[in-house]
Image: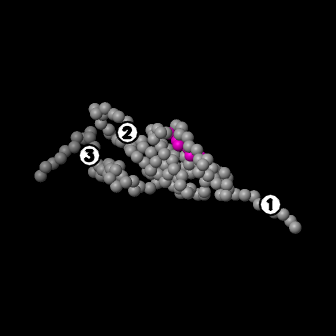
Amino acid sequence: MTLIRFNERQAPRNPWAEMEKMRREMEMIWPRFFGDTTTGASVYPALNISEDPTTIYVRAEIPGTPAEAISIFVEGDTLTITGERNEPVTPETISYHRQEIGYGRFNRAVTLPTRINAEKVTAAARNGILTITLPKAVEAMPRRIAVTSS
C-alpha cells in the first residue's frame, strides 16, 4: 500500500473543483460541434428590446465586432442580426489560463411585438452597443377616435 503525504503547507486538491472545471470546459466546447443550444444570458448577442408609442428599440451587445461585419434583416415581424467577431491574432508563445470571450459567426433572430415600417429602420453601433430603431407601421400605432354626439 502506498501512503501519500501532503506537505502541511499545501492543501490537497479538491476533486470536485476539478470536475467543475471540466464541466465548464465541456460547456465551452459543445456549441462548436453542435451549435448553441443554451438559453438565457449566454445567447449572443444579448438583447434588450423596448418600445414607446411610435418606435421599437433593440439594443445588442457586440463588443469587438466591427460595424461592417454586422448585417440586419427585417422580414415580416422577424428581426435577424448576423455577424462575425474575429479572434485577435496572438503570438504562438501565449497560452491562455482562461478564455471566456467567444469568437466566430453569430445569428440572432427575434419576433417583434408589432408590425414595423421596414423602410425607416436605422442602426448605429457605439461603444460596443448596436442600437436598432424600428418605427412602428402606421396601422400598428394606436389612434385616438373622436366621439361625436348626435
Give how far across and how far down residue 36 sits, in percent. Answer: 39, 53
- Magenta highlight on residue 129: yes
The amino acid beneath tag 1 is Ala
- Disc 1 or disc 2, which is closer to the eye? 1
Q: CA distance from mark 3 to mark 2?
A: 37 Å
Q: Is residue 117 left or right of residue 47?
A: right
In magenta, the rendered stretch is 128-133
What residue is shown with label 3?
Answer: 12
Local crowd size for mark 2, using a 10 Å CA cut-off: few (<14), some (14–19), many (≥20)? few
Image height check: is 17 above or below 98?
below
Q: Is residue 2 visible?
A: yes
- Quarter location, residue 10: top left
The amino acid beneath tag 3 is Pro
Q: Is residue 77 left or right of residue 144?
A: left
User: Residue at 39% of width from left, 56% of height from top?
Assistant: 37
Local crowd size for mark 3, using a 10 Å CA cut-off: few (<14), some (14–19), many (≥20)? few
User: Residue at 39% of width from left, 44% of height from top?
Assistant: 104
Give how far across and how far down residue 132 sits, in percent. Answer: 56, 46
- Quarter location, residue 124: top right
Kindly identify which numbered label has been placed on residue 87: 2
**Could you tell which of marks 3 and 2 lies nearer the N-terminus?**
3
Q: Is residue 20 visible?
A: no
**Of helix, strand and loop, which mostly describes the magenta segment?**
strand
- Disc 3 or disc 1, which is closer to the eye? 1
Does the residue at mark 3 contact the one at mark 2 (Cβ under 8 Å)? no
Instruction: Tell me the SS state at disc 1.
Output: loop
Instruction: Tell me the SS state at disc 2.
Output: loop
Give how far across and how far down residue 107 sits, in percent. Answer: 44, 50
Q: CA distance from mark 1 to mark 2?
A: 58 Å
Does the residue at mark 1 contact the one at mark 2 (Cβ under 8 Å)? no
Q: In the rendered view of the protein, which quadrant contains the C terminus?
A: bottom right
What residue is shown with label 1?
Answer: 146
